[in-house]
Image (cartoon, helix red, strand yellow):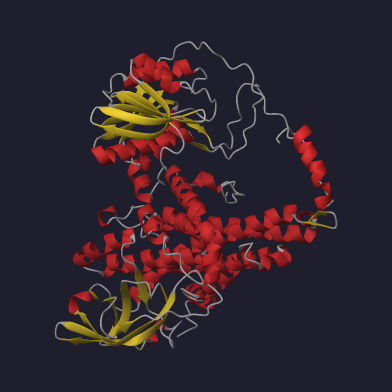
Amino acid sequence: MKPFESPDYFNMDELLSDEEKMIRSAVREWVGENVMPVIEKAYLDAVFPRDLIPQMGELGLFGPNLPEKYGCAGTNNVAYGIMMQELERADSGVRSFASVQGSLVMYPIYAYGTEKQRQHWLPKLASGEKIGCFGLTEPDHGSDPGGMKTTAVKDGNSYILNGAKMWITNGTLADVAVVWAKLDGTVRGFLVEKGTPGFSAPEMHNKHSLRASVTSELILQDCRIPAENLLPESGGLKSPLGCLTQARYGIAWGVMGAAMACYDEALNYAKTRIQFDKPIASFQLVQQKLVYMVTEITKMQLLSLQLGRLKDQKKFKFTHVSMAKRNNVFQALEIARLARDILGANGITAEYQSMRHMCNLETVKTYEGTHDIHTLIIGADITGIPAYS
Amino acid sequence: MNIAVCIKQTPDTAIRVKVADDGKSIVQDGIQWVINPYDEFAVEEALQLTEKHGGEVTIVSLGPAGIEKTIREALAMGAHKAIRIDADHIPDDPSVTAKALVEVLKNGNYDLIFLGRQAVDDDHHQMASLVSQALGLPCVTVVVKLEIDGGKGTALREVEGGYEKVAFALPAVIGANRHLNTPRYRSLKGIMQAKKKTIEVLPATLAAPKLVVEKLTPPPAKKEGKIFKNGAADAAEVARLLRDEAKVI
């Protein structure tokens, strides 16, 4: 089979370094040979393909933009984004796994943890030997995480955690959970290990989206953890939001992969599907859809690349990430819907991938700051008037 | 072990090449360059041997600065260092390349020299033989299994209709075949480390070629297929054509 080629209408490849392109082709090759053949079935069966985890670790797909001394690759942020794009070309669930592990577990341990915590956890998380999850959202507090009910109370040499978290990717699989809880009214981060008495992580079932991904609840009932499991540098809501900025950055890149997969599938289908004795690609209405798709992909590529370069120059702001996440997810979802439309009835079957991407992207539109919340973040930034407080 | 692996940059086999206007070369624009796939088996085997026995793998390749991108691919797999023999082009005549490689290889004190059995672009299938001849070393090509024990090696080589097992003494020249191993994926860490590894550039004086490419022609266009529309009723006719026309049964 011909290897996947991403659309490059504006010669964007000229803006990438040899190394960035080499990373893209390395991840693309692995995805094509190891993820694509299994992902459709995993999605239908609603399981995460766990065999991929050690391979992903070996390839260095967990936290690659963190320093080498912790077992990470030490790539720049553009390369990190490209890797996410390639993973999500297969499935948003696979990209989510890497996003959570890298940006929501390894990053907070790196940014807010002690050197001892870093040394202990980061190499194991980088290799995939250990899996992590991130517990911020609660059943009654999604877009307003500041209202969280989960608490931590100091008791001698321990903290006692109580509360519940919901919509937690990898929760049931995780060896360690980064749990956010209020300690004396301030949000702090805690490391809760699997098997700790009072801690459980039941899997949530019956999802119509992100089926090849484990989503869980985290339940903390008088869960006693050692005091040294506090992430000491965490303090206030800005700490978990700092993690989300990292993860949203990866999403802005990742969804381009889903969009590219849908565009590629729709374009090939339109060129070969014959109706009224000619390929449907010859019809103006179909061309209009394909042009919309490739144009939006091209705009996403430019937006993401500049975002990545700003991040590498340490000039990026969380509002930049909000704009890229908001735009790219919205457009990727539009592209997936249009692709499904072009595929006609065939598009609803598992023979094709567009509808799977479409269903996944409905989640991606909501998680990590909903589309509307990102609108209000940018709105507050440009007007100086927050609409949500 | 001190191992050299000679690699060649070739066009990606998934890409359709076009003959250039001069009729003797291919259009370079838009070509994705890769390590010659047979050379990838060679690199992998060398890496596995040094992982087992210790030592170093040196990549050796002949060509202009542009091939360093491909050399980095081999370094990203885990090779330790590389030598680029500087030349403004990759010669068409294998004997010219072989002479230049030997000039470098003879000074390296290598226990093993690996190459791919052939390059997928010009398919000469000569380099391992030419290099080993010039160095006076045993040459084992089309190798699908290799075992090294001390100063000796045994190899299984593919021959027509079966396999041949041969024994040889080190140093030796090995031509790797498909199935020798499964080349590893380049990891992100490997790619980042490759950037820091040294590619030594050595000058080359290329001999005058004894072989020149006069003309390249694409294969003849594929004839249109035949479509049988009557299902089982056409079976006899299909069988007859497969026998009499296509001569495949």
Q: Quadrant of residue B226?
A: top right
Report the number of numbered marks: 0
In this rendering, would B141 be left or right of A300?
Answer: left
In this rendering, would B20 be left or right of B75?
Answer: right
Looking at the image, the residue that sits furthest to the left is A156
Residue A56 on image: x %, y %: 40, 57
Residue B54 on image: x %, y %: 23, 38
Residue A351 on image: x %, y %: 64, 62
* Figure check: B47 above or below A45: above
* Figure check: B12 above or below A331: above
Residue B248 visible in the snapshot: yes
In terms of depth relative to the viewer, which is nearer, A231 or B220?
A: B220
Residue A335 on image: x %, y %: 63, 64
Q: Residue at x 77, y 61 (%)?
A: A285
Q: Residue at x 14, y 82 (%)?
A: A157
In terms of depth relative to the viewer, which is nearer, A292 or B104?
A: B104
* Position of the C terminus of chain A by quadrant: bottom left
Residue B204 visible in the snapshot: no
* Figure check: B65 above or below A32: above
In this rendering, would B240 be left or right of B2?
Answer: right
In terms of depth relative to the viewer, which is nearer, B60 or B41?
A: B41
